[in-house]
Amino acid sequence: MEAFIIYITVFVLAIFVGFEVITKVPPTLHTPLMSGANAISGITVVGALVAAGSKESTIAAVLGCAAVIMATINVVGGFLVTNRMLLMFKKKK
Amino acid sequence: MGISLINIVYLVASVCFILGLKGLASPRTAPRGNLIGALGMLLAVVATLLDQQIVTFQLIIIGLVVGGAIGTYLALTVEMTAMPQMVAAFNGFGGGASALVAATALLAPGALTNVPPTQLYVATAASGLIGAATFTGSMVAWGKLQGVLRWQPKSDSLQKTINGTLFLAAMALGALVVINPTAFWAYCLLVAVASVLGVMLTVPIGGADMPVVIALLNSYSGLAACATGFVLGNNVLIIAGSLVGASGLILTSIMCKAMNRSLAHVLFGTLGPTAETATADEVYGGKVKSASAEEAAMIFETARLVIIVPGYGMAVAQAQHSVRDLANLLQEKGAEVRYAIHPVAGRMPGHMNVLLAEADVPYDQLFALEDINDTFPEADVALVIGANDVVNPSARQDKTSPIYGMPILDVDKSQTVMIIKRSLSPGFAGIPNPLFAAPNALMLYGDGKEMVRELIAALREQ
């Protein structure tokens, strides 16, 4: 129970931080915001790596490998495409 | 590397994510913000690889190489017009990965997690449900945006009953996972039911409502990561997932407000003409004026302020580069050019801005609805290209209109409105647009790109 309270605390505070930070993003950057946030949600790769690398269960390792592939597409593709878009935004010369 | 040291690296990664999103507050700081976010991700991955539970690297290397190659290829080759479907697909992969990781935690709890059993199983069920529904829902959204999936059943009561039943079944299976966690088949069945639910919820939603759906799926992919964080007892997943969940929810609410519709109406309702809606003949009958490119060019010649209103049709016609050339020519002739961007122009939030940025339109010429609406009365010409419902004055004047109350761009208040359009066909809402019959409106019939090119040629000759 003690541990659960700590996780919930982190969760609620992070939601508030998220709202504060995201509301400051201007509409012109909403597409890069989505692709960038998307890349961040690929953080699930962290769990996938442990699953793919442990020896406790073979099925878990295989599922973990599939999860690593999907999450890595998300992370690598997300950050790269966001970078590609952001470099297009230029001010008037 | 000790557990506490790994957790400190995770904390640093979380801070990087927050700073990265903070950088997106301005186009100037945004590229650096994105790099900081990517750095956070790299730190988290490297720290995880030093985890003592990892004993074999074969599958990890395969996963990282394959995923990295596919991601790189997609990111570097995608056309900007296809960005919505790519973000949809990425959302799906994120959700799917979360559901898979939750499954592995059921199979190998010893290696992955040490959270209390109740938290583990409840969070696993949540992750499976949200993750799987996000995966299939995103794939449907991808198919629709890509144009490979054309099936669009009407959202009727039968469908609502099916969805309700599926949701209850998913809840029951979720409870079963919690009560009897050794029954792995229950989790598999939960994922299967959630997958069908994801398809059923997304399939009735039409093209112009896609911005809402993608934003919502974005939020779900974050929440799935968050649930997986509770499964693994890992704060960096909880924090990153919450940030993304919040981001998606904010964008969803912005999109809904921009259409003056509730989220429930977008997801389950239908939009279209009612018995009270005026017919096209009543609205247009003999009142619509059209002009040639030469006549239009004469009006542009003396204009001092021109506001361009692009819609999704501009992207379909691939006209953004020609539009920029026209704007440059008008500026050479001494006019001021601004772009007015409606929040739901395009197929995802901010899509139009990216398309124009790609065509080298400076971002300080792009104005959001609330920043430009007061300027239309001063504009000599408002040029509408590929937009329809978002400039329909019925939203302001006609209480019986299905789009009444939706915030629109007040193009009808400018001196002259020119609308580039193939015909008088209705937009997504399926209703006629009285703007086309307004006394100060001129229709320029034709393909978006060609008409803009004709305008440029006519202006050069003058």
Image (tube, coloured by chain):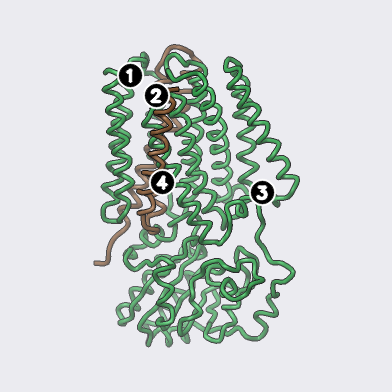
- Which residue shows up at 49% across the image and 79% down it? B418
- Which residue shows up at 64% across the image and 31% down it? B170
- Amino acid type for the residue under numbered disc 3: Trp
Position of residue B86 relative to residue B381, above or below, is above
Drawn colour of chain B?
green
Task: Please name whichever residue, B11 or A35, is drawn nearer the observer in this view of the structure.
Answer: B11
Tell me where residue B27 sits by quadrant. bottom left
Drawn colour of chain A?
brown
- The span from disc 2 to disc 1 (Cα, nearest Å) is 10 Å
Of helix, strand and loop, which one carries label 1?
A: loop
- Which quadrant would the N terminus of chain B be assigned to in this image? top left
- The span from disc 4 to disc 1 (Cα, nearest Å) is 29 Å
Q: Tell me, yes or no, whether dots 3 and 2 are on the same chain.
A: no
The residue carrying mark 3 is B151
- Amino acid type for the residue under numbered disc 1: Asp
- Amino acid type for the residue under numbered disc 2: Leu
Q: Chain of mark 3?
A: B
As drawn, the label of residue A35 is 4
Task: Please name whichever residue, B199 or A21, is drawn nearer the observer in this view of the structure.
Answer: A21
As drawn, the label of residue A86 is none
Q: Tell me, yes or no, whether dots 4 and 2 are on the same chain.
A: yes
- Which quadrant would the C terminus of chain B be assigned to in this image? bottom left
As drawn, the label of residue A49 is 2
N-term mark: 3 or 1: 1
- Which residue shows up at 41% across the image and 23% down it? A3
- Amino acid type for the residue under numbered disc 4: Ser
The residue carrying mark 1 is B51
Q: Position of residue B429 (x, y in %)?
A: 62, 64
